[in-house]
Image (spheres, rainbow, N blue to C red):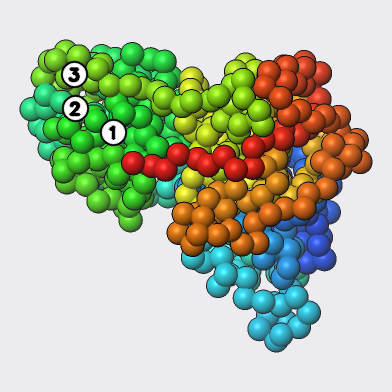
């Protein structure tokens, strides 16, 4: 009688991840996930020890946005899993493909209110595409395969798998590892013909590209289609650089903080093709009463005149030969409007203005990837940057948590070792996840952190002054950030004068190591209000 080879579920999960090409897992160990870590110890997959689980989720998110592959983060039961919530919600709002793995108390103790027992799946359900509690090892094998397949080929977003510790240690037949799973991704091909007819009649077409173009690996398809038919392209926030913003057909960002050219086109076009975007309230500020063909794998976000539930690449393949009417007149009309924001930077004035500092950061960064945090500096970066490549600007658009930038930069740097990474972060956001300086130092990552220090929660102060007349609880009594970085064995310096920021960024990028630059700016400067 032939003996069937057995393997523990923890070892099987790691082998599947290896086979699927996972190179990094971002996590923090804890008691209930230890069997998984024991299997990971013998794996070719590199585990990146983050100093907080929120950092693990943000790092996996940054890795996904930069590699166009799923990111993976791991935590233990109870507090470990709950600490992931901010980062998982961030990824959910921006449709970032994350595989989220948590450990849990053994099955016999679930619901018994024992130490660290909490209904993790109920917490994760609203902020993930799927959240599963695994009670049988065979189920775990099937679900992890389905999750990876979905994240690579289907609708993107976080998928959560919760493994009780005892289940991780159960044995299964090793043959299960070789079984394949097949998913049927929904498509609505019936509307392609209608889309072609609308495009043929259009005299003023506009492509509105979202991040779904990136996840569909359709960047080249988009550029070829736009160039062939001479259709202008605007983008949403997370899709900036999908078509280089110095390309003749690029109009830049559309919507809130959008360019004059993009918003004019959005309000005066006779047909918008919204590809891989969800038409958020910020994007709709740049759109008029115009027919919209919306293409997205996520049926929940479809809200156009003509909705097509499809992969963007498939859609572009279907209509690549379909031409609108001659667009020369339309392009000439758009050429009268600015594709850049006219920002006065007061470069010679002191105290140093934040917009002047950020202008110097962007001038000195070269081809580095910029990772943006949340705060008043976020607006200045978005107004001043020109994105020339896909995913050259990384930030959280949908949720906007403070503290995203530094841990996300870890994932970005590991995903793109050919690039330097420049983080722009405020003094408030930096102090929410600064413990990840330890991770950056340990891995010796070439990350330059540009810390904009206005000694306050600047954007909140501005809103308080605007709506409530007087600021309250927004002043920050900050530490010595240079000494703090040095304590983590990271080189650092402080600058506060025009011209010095540009020099400091240039010097930092040359050393190919972690560097922190504290930039003292005018604490009373406000961002411009949107029109």
Q: Relative to residue 107, is residue 337 drawn left or right? A: left
**Percent from the top left, x then y, of residue 120?**
62, 70
> What residue do we see at 73% from left, 29% from top?
496
Return the residue nearer the eye: 480 or 234.
480
Return the residue nearer the eye: 339 or 444.
339
Q: Relative to residue 434, is residue 246 drawn left or right? A: left
Q: Mark 3 and mark 2: span between their CA atoms? A: 13 Å
N-term-proximal mark, 2 vs 1: 2
> What residue do we see at 28% from left, 33% from top?
263
N-term-proximal mark, 3 vs 1: 1
Mark 3 touches mark 2? (CB < 8 Å): no
- State the SS at label 3: helix
Return the residue nearer the eye: 153 or 456.
456
Q: Which residue is mark 2?
A: 205
The tag on residue 263 is: 1
> What residue do we see at 16% from left, 13% from top?
328
The tag on residue 531 is: none
């Amino acid at each position: 009688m032939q003996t069937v080879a057995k393997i523990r579920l923890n070892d099987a999960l790691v082998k599947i991840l290896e086979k699927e090409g996972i190179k990094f897992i971002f996590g923090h160990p804890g008691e209930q996930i230890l069997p998984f870590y024991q299997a990971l110890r013998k794996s070719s997959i590199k585990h990146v020890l983050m100093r907080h689980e929120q950092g693990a989720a943000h790092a996996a998110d940054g890795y996904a946005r930069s590699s166009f592959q799923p990111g993976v983060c791991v935590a233990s039961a109870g507090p470990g899993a709950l600490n992931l919530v901010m980062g998982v919600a961030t990824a959910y709002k921006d449709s970032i493909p994350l595989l989220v793995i948590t450990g849990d108390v053994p099955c016999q103790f679930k619901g018994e209110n024992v130490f660290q027992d909490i209904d993790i799946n109920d917490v994760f359900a609203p902020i993930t595409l799927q959240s599963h509690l695994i009670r049988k090892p065979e189920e775990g094998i099937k679900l992890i395969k389905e999750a990876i397949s979905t994240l690579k080929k289907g609708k993107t977003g976080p998928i959560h798998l919760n493994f009780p510790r005892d289940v991780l240690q159960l044995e299964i037949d090793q043959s299960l590892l070789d079984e394949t799973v097949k998913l049927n991704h929904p498509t609505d091909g019936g509307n392609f013909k209608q889309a072609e007819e609308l495009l043929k009649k259009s005299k003023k077409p506009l492509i509105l590209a979202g991040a779904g173009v990136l996840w569909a690996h359709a960047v080249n398809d988009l550029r070829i289609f736009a160039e062939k038919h001479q259709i202008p392209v605007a983008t949403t926030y997370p899709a900036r650089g999908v078509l280089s913003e110095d390309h003749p057909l690029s109009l830049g960002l559309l919507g809130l903080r959008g360019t004059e050219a993009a918003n004019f086109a959005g309000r005066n076009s006779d047909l918008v093709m919204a590809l891989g975007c969800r038409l958020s309230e910020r994007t709709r500020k740049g759109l008029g009463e115009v027919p919209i063909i919306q293409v997205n794998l996520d049926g929940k976000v479809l809200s156009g005149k003509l909705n097509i539930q499809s992969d963007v690449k498939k859609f572009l393949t279907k209509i690549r030969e379909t031409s609108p009417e001659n667009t020369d007149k339309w392009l000439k009309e758009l050429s009268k409007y600015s594709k850049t924001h006219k920002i006065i930077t007061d470069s010679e004035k002191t105290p140093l203005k934040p917009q002047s500092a950020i202008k110097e950061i962007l001038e000195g960064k070269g081809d580095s990837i910029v990772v943006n945090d949340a705060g008043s500096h976020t607006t200045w970066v978005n107004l001043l940057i020109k994105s020339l490549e896909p995913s050259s600007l990384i930030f959280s658009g949908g949720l906007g948590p403070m503290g995203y930038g530094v841990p996300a930069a870890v994932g970005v740097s590991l995903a793109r070792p050919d690039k330097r990474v420049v983080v722009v972060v405020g003094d408030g956001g930096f102090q929410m996840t600064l413990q990840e300086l330890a991770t950056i130092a340990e891995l010796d990552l070439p990350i330059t952190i540009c810390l904009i220090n206005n000694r306050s929660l600047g954007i909140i102060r501005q809103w308080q002054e605007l709506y409530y007349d007087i600021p309250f609880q927004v002043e920050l009594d900050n530490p010595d950030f240079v000494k703090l970085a040095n304590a983590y064995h990271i080189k650092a310096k402080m600058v506060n004068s025009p011209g010095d920021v540009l020099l400091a960024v240039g010097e930092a990028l040359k050393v190919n190591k972690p560097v922190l630059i504290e930039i003292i700016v005018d604490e009373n400067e406000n961002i411009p209000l949107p029109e």
